[in-house]
């Protein structure tokens, strides 16, 4: 944290600090909803545009590939242009992508999705640093606002996609186009941050040497944990509504089940980091994660639909545990903030690249086998991999110990 940034924080009026907080919240509102809004609409989009399930699954895969491609470059762009400039530019790119998707043809849909993926990738990397930079003495509280806003909007997008599509004459185009509204609001508020543009990440760049983590087994285990939990989440985002619809749920109800997963996650994304930070080993939390996720997926696999709410809640709790642990490992297994940044970049880039295979593979298996049994078995196998990676990552130690 530079003294300049601290003076910027002290120099803001109360209204200025409020607008800063509002800028963070509004940007966070746009970081998950453009992706989660697609899942409940996948079948409708597929049938309307006459594309395959594999291509439809790519609508969720493309943003993950963008996350993997751009994650290593976010900090470098911020050093060169300033963090506010990069985040505002990402917001503009996101809005262009949101405008393209509802145009009505396949090319526009996929082009818009690519732009959205690039924009959110930059935000994923820079938003935590932006919060720390501007609220150095309130990091926990402001991170809570940011995380809650992101997850809440993601949950609402999943639940309202089908109702918006059904109540509008424009169908899925209206449901995707609706999210232009919060993006436009975020742009308007972010214009108030223009006087505060600076280059906060320059501090220490001449004295810090990048950590070479590719030789660290622990770093790869944390990367695997990050990738597998992402694969589980995004595969469910893409296909869970379709799975439940084929098992007898109404389309709208199936969409709300995806929302319930994300609503259930919310309190645990706050609680689990606090607990994990007080433990020398996080293995008990990893074991809890795996048991809950395995039980929830098994209930769906065996089509015990009379208990569907229970399975969904278990998956939601497990997802909150898994995501929180992945974020905490970046800090708990590194000695300083620079190592944590390197580990985060490595894990997000490689992890999201691995996770990107999930939705497309799910769709391809469904096309070939005309059912969801094998794809669900694949997810349960992934849970076993999550256990193996998590038990290694959860053991006390640092990624640089054996380099």
Image: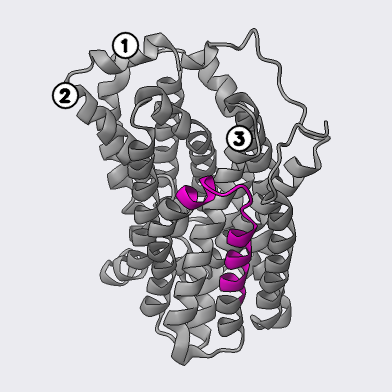
Q: Mark 3 or 2, which is nearer the eye?
A: 2
Residue at (52, 87) in percent of width and height: 247
Q: Is residue 282 magenta?
A: yes
Percent across and percent down for residue 305 are: 48, 89
Q: Are marks 1 and 3 in contact (CB under 8 Å)?
A: no
Residue situated in front as seen by the camera: 79 or 333: 333
Element at label 1: helix
Residue 235 appearing in the image: no
Mark 1 or mark 2: whose residue is earlier in sequence: 1
Q: Which residue is mark 1?
A: 7
Residue 160 in the image, given as x and y percentages of width and height: 32, 65
Corner quadrant of residue 331: top right
Residue at the spot of label 2: 14
Q: Establish if 152 lies above or below 333.
A: below
The label on residue 71 is 3
Find the magenta span and give its range: 273-294
Q: In which quadrant of the rendered image does the N terminus lie?
A: top left
């Amino acid at each position: 944290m530079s003294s300049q940034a601290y003076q910027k924080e002290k120099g803001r009026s109360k209204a200025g600090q409020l607008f800063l907080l509002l800028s963070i919240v509004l940007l966070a509102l746009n970081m998950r909803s453009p992706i989660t809004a697609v899942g409940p609409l996948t079948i409708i989009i597929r049938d309307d545009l006459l594309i395959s399930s594999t291509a439809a699954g790519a609508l969720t895969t493309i943003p993950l590939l963008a996350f993997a491609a751009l994650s290593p470059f976010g900090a470098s762009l911020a050093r060169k242009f300033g963090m506010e400039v990069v985040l505002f530019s990402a917001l503009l790119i996101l809005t262009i992508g949101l405008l393209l998707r509802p145009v009505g043809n396949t090319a526009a849909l996929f082009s818009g999705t690519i732009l959205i993926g690039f924009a959110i990738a930059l935000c994923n990397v820079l938003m935590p640093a932006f919060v720390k930079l501007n609220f150095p003495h309130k990091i926990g509280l402001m991170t809570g606002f940011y995380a809650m806003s992101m997850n809440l909007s993601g949950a609402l997008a999943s639940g309202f996609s089908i109702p918006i599509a059904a109540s509008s004459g424009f169908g899925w185009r209206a449901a995707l186009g609706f999210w232009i509204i919060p993006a436009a609001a975020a742009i308007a508020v972010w214009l108030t941050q223009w006087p505060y543009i600076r280059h906060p990440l320059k501090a220490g760049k001449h004295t810090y040497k990048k950590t070479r983590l590719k030789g660290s087994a622990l770093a790869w285990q944390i990367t695997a944990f990050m990738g597998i939990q992402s694969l589980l989440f995004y595969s469910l985002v893409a296909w869970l509504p379709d799975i439940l619809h084929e098992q007898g749920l109404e389309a709208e109800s199936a969409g709300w089940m995806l929302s319930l997963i994300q609503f259930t996650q919310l309190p645990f994304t706050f609680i689990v980091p606090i607990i994990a930070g007080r433990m020398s080993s996080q293995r008990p939390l990893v074991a809890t994660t795996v048991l809950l996720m395995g039980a929830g997926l098994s209930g769906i696999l065996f089509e015990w639909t009379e208990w569907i709410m229970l399975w969904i809640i278990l998956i939601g709790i497990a997802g909150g545990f898994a995501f929180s642990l992945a974020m905490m490992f970046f800090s708990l297994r590194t000695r300083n903030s620079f190592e944590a940044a390197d580990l985060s970049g490595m894990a997000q880039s490689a992890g999201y690249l691995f996770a990107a295979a999930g939705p497309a593979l799910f769709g391809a298996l469904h096309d070939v086998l005309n059912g969801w049994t094998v794809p669900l078995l694949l997810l349960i196998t992934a849970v076993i991999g999550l256990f193996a990676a998590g038990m290694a990552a959860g053991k006390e130690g640092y990624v640089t110990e054996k380099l």
